[in-house]
Image: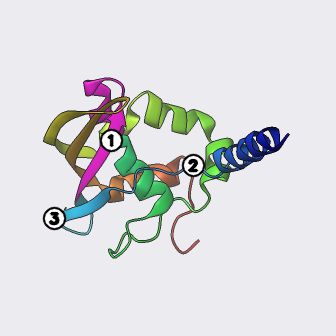
Amino acid sequence: MKMFKSVFSLSVVLVIFSCGPIRYNSEVFVSGKENKSVYTFTAKGAAKKQEKAIYEAEKNAFRVIMFTGVPGTDLSMPLVGNENEAMNNHKNYFDRFFNQNAYTAFVLNRSTVTSSKKIRGGYEATVSIKVNIESLRTDLEQNEIIRKFGY
């Protein structure tokens, strides 16, 4: 009976923690700033296939910019205030943005920092991408994901 209680308790704990908020790879940081509009980010991503790990790293950078912010920079506040609300209310936009790679319109330059390396369950890649933040912000405003500053 003790074994059953232990297994049941562990199962409950696992279910509770698996229902938490989505957490993105926090290994995204600003590695350069060209001007007030253009930033260079270094980001890590992981996937089962090598090529997909590179795209996941790029998407992680955009997820952090939009939904988390980059601590210790002038991008510490996320562009989108409420991730769950935005994802629910603008499902088509975010599906196109992340799943159909519309985010690439805001990437000015990209390079692989480290080749995809084998990790448990797949591959991990580190990329450097130059992003036009002002264009991204304008696109979010035009698609009514965020309000224009001051309105």
Q: Secondary structure at mark 2?
A: loop
* Residue 38 visible here: yes
Q: CA distance from mark 1 to mark 2?
A: 15 Å
Q: Which residues are magenta?
A: 40-56
Q: Residue at x 38, y 42 (%)?
A: 59
Q: Position of residue 34 (x, y in %)?
A: 16, 64
Q: Secondary structure at mark 3?
A: loop
Q: Left or right: where does residue 132 sit relative to residue 148?
A: left
Residue 124 lies in the magenta stretch = no
> How far from the left and from the top, in percent, is residue 110?
18, 42
Query: Which residue is under mark 1?
Result: 45
Indicate left or right for 71 with 4 as reference. Answer: left
- Asked whether the residues under the numbered discs 1 and 2 touch, taking CB atoms below 8 Å apart as contact, a structural biologist would say no
Front one among 14 and 59? 14
Q: Amino acid at mark 3?
A: Glu
Sequence-wise, the earlier of marks 3 and 2 is: 2
Q: CA distance from mark 3 to mark 2?
A: 31 Å
Q: Residue at x 14, y 42 (%)?
A: 114
Instruction: Assess disc 3: are there few (<14), some (14-19) or many (≥20) residues with their C-alpha within 10 Å of its C-alpha.
Output: few
**In this rendering, position of residue 150 left or right of residue 65:** right
**Label 2 packing within 10 angstroms: few (<14), some (14-19), many (20+):** few
Picture coordinates of residue 137 (x, y %)?
42, 57
- Of callouts 1 and 3, which one flags the residue occurring earlier in the amino acid sequence? 3
Gap between marks 1 and 3, in whole Å? 24 Å
Task: Point out which mark residue 34 bears.
Answer: 3
Q: Position of residue 22 (x, y in %)?
A: 57, 49
On residue 22, the disc is: 2
